[in-house]
Image (cartoon, rainbow, N blue to C red):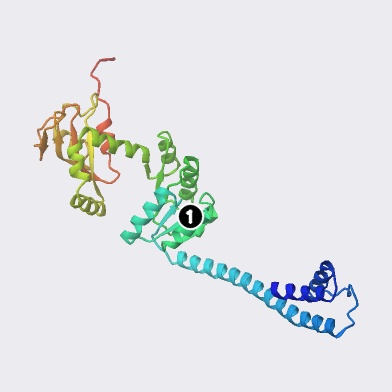
């Protein structure tokens, strides 16, 4: 069309027309408006130029218009069919996982679930993140997870687990409240940034709360206090495979420190494990002087500063037991 307009304008100008009159005449013709000729078309040359402009220009505009309509229609149909296909796939899911947020943590969570073969659907309102998730082959649904209709669209009534890992504590609390009201039997795992948010998420209905900053600080403390143990547990491929196997069994390996002033200082291994009621057992004790005691006997007494390598159930009361303050002795109403 650019070539036709340029050639026809040049042809009219060759007959003595001004550029403005020539371009105006060409545009009126190719767009089939046809108000009137700006100058008389009374020669064979002008008749030929005008006929060529009508045939080529009108045909070209029909083709351009048809192409634009086809492109727009195809885009809309593709979006409609794509949305219906995703909706159909979500409706087939049972006992799946709903991931709210495809940020840094959501990306890693999706990768691990995909490797583990667990069915899941991702909720996010950011189109760029959704495009990235789709490119990885993940099932996604666009929308704000704080909206109950979006949660229903993700099949929350049939879901087994909901993981809300948005960076906003307020949004995670709101999603937890909505999810709990929509599915009382749902297991909810929520992310929290501020330590004070943990209690709010638990009150809102979360089964477990993960504090990434707190976990990161614990790992760094392990590396500082017990570098050899950390290297042994976290560093080798064999131990990572063992940790993966334990996770499949609902167990985890952890390192905890016997803090001064807690109730387990001076206790034996048997007494500490009895406090957990079978939730964990101690497999190694690392003394503050660097001595490592593997397979400690049941009567082994713990001192402040010791590091314990424990194996326990996921979400068990390990840290709660090891951080409990020592009981202060009483004599009547007096506490010493």
Instruction: Judge from the rendering whether residue 35 lies leftward or rightward of residue 83; answer left or right.
Output: right
> Left or right: where does residue 27 sit relative to residue 114?
right
The spot of residue 114 in percent (x, y) is: 35, 60
Element at label 1: helix
Q: Which residue: 40% across, 34% down?
A: 195
Which residue is located at x 44 percent, y 58 percent? 133
- For residue 289, what is the image quadrant? top left
Image height check: is 333 above or below 152?
above
Quadrant of the image containing the C terminus: top left
Q: Which residue is mark 1?
A: 129
Q: Quadrant of the N terminus?
A: bottom right
Placement of 126 over or under 268, stated as above or below: below
Residue at 89%, 72% (x, y): give it: 38
Q: At x 64% / y 74%, what residue is drawn?
A: 67
Q: Position of residue 71 (x, y in %)?
A: 61, 71
Query: Could you say which quadrant of the image residue 47 lies in?
Result: bottom right
| Residue found at the very far bottom of the displayed protein | 44
């Amino acid at each position: 069309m650019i070539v036709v307009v340029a050639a026809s304008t040049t042809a009219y100008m060759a007959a003595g027309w001004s550029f403005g009159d020539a371009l105006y005449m060409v545009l009126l013709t190719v767009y089939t408006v046809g108000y009137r000729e700006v100058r008389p078309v009374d020669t064979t040359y002008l008749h030929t130029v005008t006929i060529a402009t009508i045939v080529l220009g009108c045909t070209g505009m029909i083709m351009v218009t048809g192409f634009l309509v086809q492109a727009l229609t195809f885009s809309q149909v593709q979006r409609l069919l794509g949305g219906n296909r995703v909706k159909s796939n979500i409706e087939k899911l049972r006992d799946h996982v709903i991931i709210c947020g495809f940020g840094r943590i959501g990306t890693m969570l999706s990768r691990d679930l995909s490797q583990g073969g667990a069915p899941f659907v991702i909720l996010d309102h950011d189109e760029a993140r959704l495009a990235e998730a789709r490119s990885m082959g993940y099932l996604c649904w666009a929308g704000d997870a704080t909206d109950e209709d979006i949660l229903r669209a993700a099949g929350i009534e049939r879901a087994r687990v909901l993981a809300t890992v948005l960076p906003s504590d307020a949004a995670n609390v709101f999603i937890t409240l909505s999810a709990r009201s929509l599915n009382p039997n749902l297991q909810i795992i929520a992310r929290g940034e501020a330590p004070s948010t943990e209690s709010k998420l638990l009150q809102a209905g979360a089964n477990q709360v993960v504090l990434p900053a707190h976990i990161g600080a614990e790992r760094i403390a392990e590396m500082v206090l017990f570098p050899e143990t950390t290297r042994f547990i976290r560093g080798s491929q064999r131990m990572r495979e063992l940790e993966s196997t334990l996770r499949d069994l609902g167990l985890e390996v952890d390192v905890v420190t016997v803090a001064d002033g807690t109730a387990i200082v001076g206790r034996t291994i048997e007494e500490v494990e009895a406090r957990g009621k079978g939730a964990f057992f101690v497999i190694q004790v690392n003394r503050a002087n660097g001595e490592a005691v593997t397979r400690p006997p049941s009567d082994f007494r713990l001192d402040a500063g010791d590091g314990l390598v424990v194996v326990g159930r996921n979400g068990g009361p390990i840290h709660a037991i090891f951080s409990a303050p020592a009981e202060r002795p009483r004599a009547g109403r007096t506490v010493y």
